Structures are given as C-alpha cells and as structure tokens.
Image: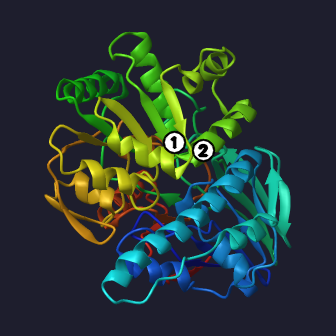
C-alpha cells in the first residue's frame, strides 16, 4: 500500500490523503486550502493527482477544509462514491452549495474592485452547479458498522467528537498475503463537550494518520470560559459597541449559541440582540435538529424543550443580503455571529470591514485560524489588515478565546493516542502547522517508541 500526502501537511487546511491499495485509489478527505491568496488558488485548482484516477472518497467530517474541493474533484472527472456519516452527508448538502455561492459572490465583489483599477475579473473556484452535481456522489454510512469500500478494504467510521457527524475512519486492509489496520483520525474533539459525545479510540491499529492542530498548545480551561465571555461582551456593551464573532457555521456557532443561552439565563449577560448572519447556520441548525443521535444525553434533553439555544427570543436569523447590510446601521450594542471562522470568506469579512476601525467595537476570535488568514492576522495583533484587498487600521478591541476549540489540545491528543491499541508500526502526523505537528510527533515518539513517526511534507509518499 502506498500513502501520498496531498494536503494539510505542515499546515492545518486542505486535508487530502491518497491511498493506493490493490490497484485502486482511495482519497481520505478532499478539503479546501485556506491561507495566502496565491497559494490558495494554486492548491485548490491544481490537485496533486488526476481526479479521474480516484476510485472512492472517504470523508471524516463536513468542515470545508476537509470537503471544500469535492466540487472541483467531481467537475474534473471523479466518478465514484463519496462515503461519509449520515449527518456529514446532510451537512455537505448545504455547506458545499453555500461554499459555491460564497465563491461566486466573492468573485463578483473582487472583480468590481479590480475593474476600478483596470484589472480583469476573477472566476469563482467553482459554481453552485458544480456543487449540486458533486452531491450526487454522496453515500451515507452509520457509525460502527463496517462496509466494503474497495477491493480488500473495509471501512468503519468511529465518533470523533469534533462536530456533528465527525468521524475517524478505520480501514481493515487485505493486500496479497498481508492483513493490517489503518486508522485516520480526522479531527479529534476535546471530550467533555457541551453538545457532543467523547471521541472513540481505534483498536488494534498498525498504521495511524493523525491530526496535530494543537500539538504544542494547551487550551484555556473550559470552566473559565463563561466568565471570560461575560467580561468581554459587557465591556463592549459599556462602550455602546458591537461584538462581532467569526465562527464556523457548523459546530462552533451552535456551541456559541448554547453558551450565550446559558449566560443569558444566568443573567451574567443582558438579553442582547443576537444576529446570526449566516443562511448556512440556519440550515445547519435544521440538520442539528434531525440528528439527535450525535449528541450527548445532556444536550439531547436540552433540545427536547421548546426553550432551547436555537429558539431564543432575542436571536434573529439573518438571511438576505439586505438584512445583513442593515446590521451596519445599528447604533446599539448587539452580537453578530457570522461565517467563516477564519474570516476568509462570506459575510463576516463585510462585518469586520465595517467595525474594525471603531474603538467601541470588539472582534472576538473563538477558534483556530490558519496562518495568513484575516482571522489569524487579527488574533496576532496586526494593526493593519487587508479586507477585500483594501487596507484597514485596527482600532476595535480584538479578543481571542480558544476554549471552544473543537480540536483536542496537546495533552488531550496524547491522552487519546495513549488509548489506541495495536502494533502502531507507523504514525504520520498531519493537519498541523510545522511547530505543533513536530511537537506532537515528538510526544508520540515518547509514547510509542516502537513506531516510525513522521511529519510528512506536501507530495511525500510512503510504502506501507
């Protein structure tokens, strides 16, 4: 078996890993790269393999950095099935079309700016038509039920506790006279989540492909986060400012709404108007209502009540562009939650553009942002940022909270890896920037001294 690393290598986005076994090609994830504009275009339009040569795609979860290039893959010749959990399939049906819409709208907006400078227009990465065609390839699976996905390959999806429907993928492979087990972590959740179940632990594993997003960092304790959020929001209220929060529409947004629901109930926060400016988030909430099988018992009980985090009286779902633009004219404190979480696409960039230069406002970063994204530049304290190619001076208060992270930190990753059984002859560390990936690899070498632990670079291949 040959494993080739085609994305998320010494970086956190663009997850794509190609397995060649028994003369077939299996692609684990097909994610969008997010980062520097020039690299983003190159990585997302020129794949490291011929889409026509891929026989099957196996998805870990629905986040765009794991699924966002599926429309490109299918448009350029992939003709096989795309297997994923039922919840992931439902989320992909809304997220990929939404992603395509964002690509189209952003291309139009940037093209208008370029036209003023005498420059030619830009084309979207893919269209809604491309996304709709790709959805025809989706095939739903159930947790913990092995299914054959290729000659000599049986796949089982285990709960990863990262977002609704997220999974680790365990492959039982028979090749010639060899039998072995290969596990792909996808993205690993922290455990003890307000909404999701704890991550599972693959057993009897020979080779492991694992994420390392927070391989060198420790998250803010969960028991401090509510007080921290109250302080941040109440400070902005005292300044008569807005609180703008970039958040992934799936997972992070629902966690935020649950937290704000709890804090308003406890009267730590006033019942501020909350605007969820993401048509995708509204659709995702409907998917959440349909998949109670993905929740822990506590949140299942909460969702069974009429008064739940997604139906708060002071919560407004914004859908139209006109409604979104009207938020710019609000003169009273409010909370605006909008996608994307890295502030690299969608309506959030417009909200940042219209609030970042006013010292009354707060921009709250609540999750990981890949290097060179707008979210990362704000979080790192840059005083000048470009939004839609135009410079803006940062006067708004910038705050960061990482307790909401859907990714395990370095201690949680090590504890998860410690519970994996098997020979673990080879471990490949991906989906992390250079420093966290290298740090987690070093930790794994201490934990599994018998394993060949590697941090592969983009384009590397290894024979297993």
Residue 70 locus on image (x, y percent): 66, 70
Pick out the residue farthest to the top.
266
Residue in the picture at 72% in, 55% down: 93
Q: Is residue 126 left or right of residue 399?
A: right
Q: Is residue 20 above or below residue 290?
A: below
Residue sitting at x 59%, y 64%: 101
First-in-chain label (1 vs 2): 2
Against 223, residue 163 (above or below) is below
Q: Nearer the viewer, residue 212 or 49?
A: 49
Q: Quadrant of residue 423?
A: bottom right
Q: What residue is disc 1 on? A: 189
Q: Which mark is residue 253?
A: none
The front one of 179 and 360 is: 360
**Residue, x 17% and y 37% (percent of image)?**
360
Confirm or deny contact between disc 1 and disc 2 (CB under 8 A).
yes
Q: Could you tell me if residue 342 is visible in this image?
A: no
Badge 1 crowding class, 10 Å Cα cut-off, few under 14, some 14 to 19, many 20 or more, is many
Where's residue 323, x and y in %? 49, 44
Residue 220: in sight, yes or no? yes
Tell me how far mark 1 sits from mark 2, CA to CA: 6 Å
| Disc marking residue 160 | 2
Q: Secondary structure at mark 1?
A: loop
Q: Position of residue 389 (x, y in %)?
A: 30, 72
């Amino acid at each position: 078996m040959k494993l080739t690393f085609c994305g998320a290598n010494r970086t956190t986005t663009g997850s794509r890993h190609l397995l060649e076994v028994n003369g077939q090609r299996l692609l684990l994830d097909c994610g969008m790269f997010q980062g520097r504009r020039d690299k983003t275009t190159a990585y997302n339009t020129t794949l490291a393999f011929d889409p026509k040569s891929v026989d099957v795609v196996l998805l870990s979860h629905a986040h765009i950095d794991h699924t966002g290039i599926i429309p490109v893959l299918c448009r350029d010749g992939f003709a096989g099935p795309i297997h994923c959990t039922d919840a992931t399939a439902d989320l992909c049906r809304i997220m990929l079309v939404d992603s395509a819409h964002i690509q189209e709208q952003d291309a139009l907006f940037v093209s208008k700016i370029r036209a003023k400078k005498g420059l030619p227009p830009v084309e979207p990465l893919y269209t809604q038509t491309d996304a709709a065609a790709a959805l025809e390839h989706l095939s739903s699976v159930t947790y913990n039920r092995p299914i054959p996905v290729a000659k000599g390959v049986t796949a089982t999806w285990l709960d990863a506790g990262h977002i609704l429907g997220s999974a680790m993928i365990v492959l039982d492979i028979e090749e010639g006279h060899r039998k072995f087990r290969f596990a792909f972590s996808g993205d690993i959740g922290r455990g003890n989540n307000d909404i999701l179940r704890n991550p599972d632990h693959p057993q009897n594993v020979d080779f492991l492909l694992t994420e390392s997003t927070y391989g060198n960092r420790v998250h803010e304790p969960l028991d401090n986060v509510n007080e921290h959020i109250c302080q941040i929001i109440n400070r902005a209220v005292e300044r008569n400012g807005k609180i703008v929060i970039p958040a992934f529409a799936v997972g992070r947004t629902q966690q935020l709404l649950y937290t704000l629901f709890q804090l308003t109930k406890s009267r730590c926060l006033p019942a501020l108007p909350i605007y969820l400016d993401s048509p995708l988030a509204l659709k995702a909430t409907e998917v959440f209502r349909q998949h109670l099988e993905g929740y822990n018992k506590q949140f299942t009980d909460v969702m069974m009540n009429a008064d739940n985090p997604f139906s708060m009286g002071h919560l407004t779902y914004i859908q139209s562009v006109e409604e979104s633009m009207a938020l710019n004219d609000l003169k009273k404190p409010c909370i605006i939650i909008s996608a994307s979480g890295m502030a690299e696409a969608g309506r959030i960039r417009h909200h940042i553009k219209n609030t970042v230069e006013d010292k009354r406002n707060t921009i709250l970063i609540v999750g990981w942002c890949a290097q060179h994204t707008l979210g990362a530049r704000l979080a790192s304290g840059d005083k000048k940022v470009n939004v839609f190619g135009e410079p803006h001076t940062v006067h708004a208060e910038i705050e960061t909270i990482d307790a909401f992270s859907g990714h395990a930190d370095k201690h949680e990753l090590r504890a998860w890896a410690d519970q994996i059984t098997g020979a673990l002859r080879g471990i490949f560390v991906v989906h992390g920037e250079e420093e966290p990936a290298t740090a987690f690899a070093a930790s794994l070498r201490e934990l599994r001294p018998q394993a060949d632990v590697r941090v592969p670079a983009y384009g590397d291949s290894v024979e297993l």
